[in-house]
Image (cartoon, coloured by chain):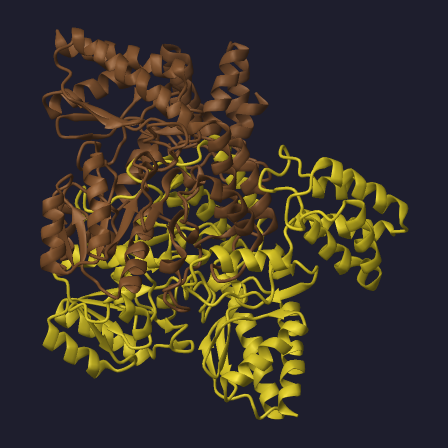
Chain colours: A yellow, B brown
Amino acid sequence: METIKRAIIYDRSLNPERTNATFERLAEVLENVLNEQSAAHISKLLDLLEQPNPRNQLNEKQADKIIEYLDKIVLSRQQIQEIGEQLQLSEISTAEAIDIHQQFKIPVSHPEEDIIPVQGKGCWIKDTKGKWYLDMDSNYSATNLGMSNPEIALGLYNQANTLISMKEDRIQIARSRFLKEIHQMMPPGLDQFYWQNSGGEAVDKALKIAKAYTGTTQVIAFKGGFHGRTHGAVAVTWNKKYREPFGLDETGWVHFADFNDLNSVETLLKTTGAKIIILEMVQGEEAGNRPATPEFVNGLWTLAKQYDAVIIDDEVQAGFGRTAVKQGDWFACMSYDLVPDIMVIGKSFGGGYPVTAVVTKKKIGSKMKYGYDGSTFGGNPMAMTATLIATRQMREKDVTGNVVARAKQIKSGIRTLRETYSIIGTYSGRGLMFGFDLGSAENVQKVQSGLRENGVKVSLSSGSMIRFLPLTIMSKGETDFFLKQLEKSIKILDS
Amino acid sequence: METIKRAIIYDRSLNPERTNATFERLAEVLENVLNEQSAAHISKLLDLLEQPNPRNQLNEKQADKIIEYLDKIVLSRQQIQEIGEQLQLSEISTAEAIDIHQQFKIPVSHPEEDIIPVQGKGCWIKDTKGKWYLDMDSNYSATNLGMSNPEIALGLYNQANTLISMKEDRIQIARSRFLKEIHQMMPPGLDQFYWQNSGGEAVDKALKIAKAYTGTTQVIAFKGGFHGRTHGAVAVTWNKKYREPFGLDETGWVHFADFNDLNSVETLLKTTGAKIIILEMVQGEEAGNRPATPEFVNGLWTLAKQYDAVIIDDEVQAGFGRTAVKQGDWFACMSYDLVPDIMVIGKSFGGGYPVTAVVTKKKIGSKMKYGYDGSTFGGNPMAMTATLIATRQMREKDVTGNVVARAKQIKSGIRTLRETYSIIGTYSGRGLMFGFDLGSAENVQKVQSGLRENGVKVSLSSGSMIRFLPLTIMSKGETDFFLKQLEKSIKILDS
């Protein structure tokens, strides 16, 4: 009972991140745990507390009355524990969380309210209803090293207790630690770093660095490419929907070439005089996980040399092993045996902490002069602590080896399913960035909701394609589980 | 001795953020603590370890030999403790940290290597040499709630152990907690949030939101203004040095008006058709802490109404009490009793965690449609945990009341100093964002280094102006200490 009491009236010395529970959440948790039996108890509690405002924080006196009541009814030790745990994980009800979101959040994106996560462990998340799901979208790769991470938690705790932030221009120790370790994962020659906080911001800065180096501003980007949302990053992103409302569809400095088509690139190099090319080696979101062909990238590198252009390789989503073809492919460019001039990295970089970077060669980086940029949070000690621990974990967990093995397992599993279920169309992707066609957006929705019912969380899709971006530490057993639930969800569709 | 051993060979289960110490750092710490006596010991240790590579991580066997040696020489309990502590705080030497920085960091800004901080407590930081300094620049406001923060550390620890990240579009609990509390600090009507990670990124998104709402792209910004470094943010920043190398000096959509000059704004409203105005209520960095006059802002609001324009108020640096004129002025606009259409907040928002936001009115925010933006890290549970705790601390510590009192104390202290030291020129600023003229950049450097010798860390300046941006929780005693050291440092100059 003590656990339930502490979950209602939070102890600030233990959980400064919490507030007191509301009655509405208490009622929801009782319903989650006691099912039909809960209604009578909730009604009695409402009377006992004289109809409290369901969304106000409960106070000490109310909490005592609730505990007194719960003490009298027959609850198993397990039920008591489960009530305490669920309340501890969220003191706010699902309905209120959704209402607050709709009331106070600028609606820039479609709100995902089907599952409201309160806890994560490895590849799994638990929602406000107490149900566990295998997470198949890893927050666009941000949580590749687990939906929670005890070692990063401890590192951040120590760092925040020691020195919580320090601006970019001041030399610092956490950054030196990171730089002494990271070279083992980098493509040769890419050893100049500039840290940022989000992927879009890092792309934006990579463009600035390329512009400063080449002394030019014209940029070639690719149809189907996605690079982020700041003015600079969105300008080089293909989807016109993302650019047009902000007057960023006709910038005068961005030219889109066809992906996997060398001629279209050469034409633009000739006609625009562009000296900067930006691409993803595996196009994601907007293109349905399409890898560049080896012929294309080899030709692109040759063209760049010929026209004296620099190549920016955006590895924010594909990097840190997600698209590995062989063990040790930490970045997609390594699968092609090519080194870009500038690389942008992010997402799993900090294991969940917002940190990204532009990485380049000395001759390029050195063209940035004092004052050309600056950052309050770029490369701060908390971020560097997160990247040190996250990249160390990636090597120890052999993420690239795991991705190769899991991708093989998934590809073969889906090939087998396709023999039975004709609805499964073209498979596309690389490593653990994959998807397949289901004929229509409606089918995608049906399979997604089937998966959800069967304990698998998916939310990515582009049209008739269902996309998956699981955690790169996903195990063999979890992959089997996914394939089994996938079959169940597709079976319904096929019948 | 156990402490020293654990500081040489780190215990990963306790300090996953560390690596093993180098010999070079051990030697530096011995020098810090034992002064002249250290040389003989270092030389003997070098022999004992057979001249180890000074920058390699020491191993267990080497550590045992070091401990065996230190055990034999006469050290006080205090010396042993100090050696252990300094080694624990940094296992890398000052010289190596500087070299690594110069070798691997893209040189976008002037490296500050005079003080390399390893620990912070309240308004104080300790460097690699073991010396403490009163911090008078708060990392551009990012560490306003202390250079370390035990409560934020614990909250982040709990959150990272529970759910380390979650993308922007998924409804989440930590964000709901924050939104239930924050309204008490916001200007009335500003209740629509969109979270970002850095100030520049948030300015960039504020511009997008204003463009989407007005259906226009022309923007009026101000001479002397600074808004950040992404393509969007730098385009509205006055200093041409920051825009020119990237082709962002002639965007075609930004027009600069004179600050505190209504006529110049009205002319641009008429000639350009701009419907978006962006300003800082107190210009910082580039303008030497210049507040807008009440006549100017009142007139600006009237003009905006007349020409149907929206005002973006960039409070990234001035906000969260730094420029308070009266208790409760959480944002600079509150001192003027005006509510902007869009506000950008950041820096101290997360008490050191990288989190910023665009805040606006419902009628403006609702013009953003699903797909118009998106973010992996925006409003993630760690960020929302940090903002909940940080903003709660601000209210409890009465930051605005403290700023008013400290600013008065400082103003009066400097006025008194000026009676004696004629070198002190014009004072400018508001709240705890202040500075004064010293006649030349050379004088500024001299006073800065005098302050450093006297235990005060300062690194901000613009030309002949010395600028200070202390932590907003600075105490009366610390303010007295600052004024005393300031006098010492100016006295030398004046003689």
In the image shown, does A90 or A124 lie closer to the viewer?
A: A90
Image height of B408 relative to B13, above or below: above
In the image shown, does A112 or B376 lie closer to the viewer?
A: A112
Residue B166 visible somewhere in the drawing? no
Which residue is at 35% across, 23% downward?
B404
User: Residue A155: image x %, image y %?
Assistant: 52, 40
Image height of B351 relative to B25, above or below: below
Residue B309 image-quadrant placement: bottom left
Q: Which quarter of the rendered picture does the N terminus of chain A lie within?
A: top right
In the image shown, does B490 or A210 lie closer to the viewer?
A: B490
In the image shown, does B172 or B217 lie closer to the viewer?
A: B217
Q: Is residue A249 left or right of residue B365?
A: left
Residue A124 image-quadrant placement: bottom right
Residue A446 image-quadrant placement: bottom right
User: Residue A370: image x %, image y %?
Assistant: 18, 41
Residue B244 visible somewhere in the drawing? yes
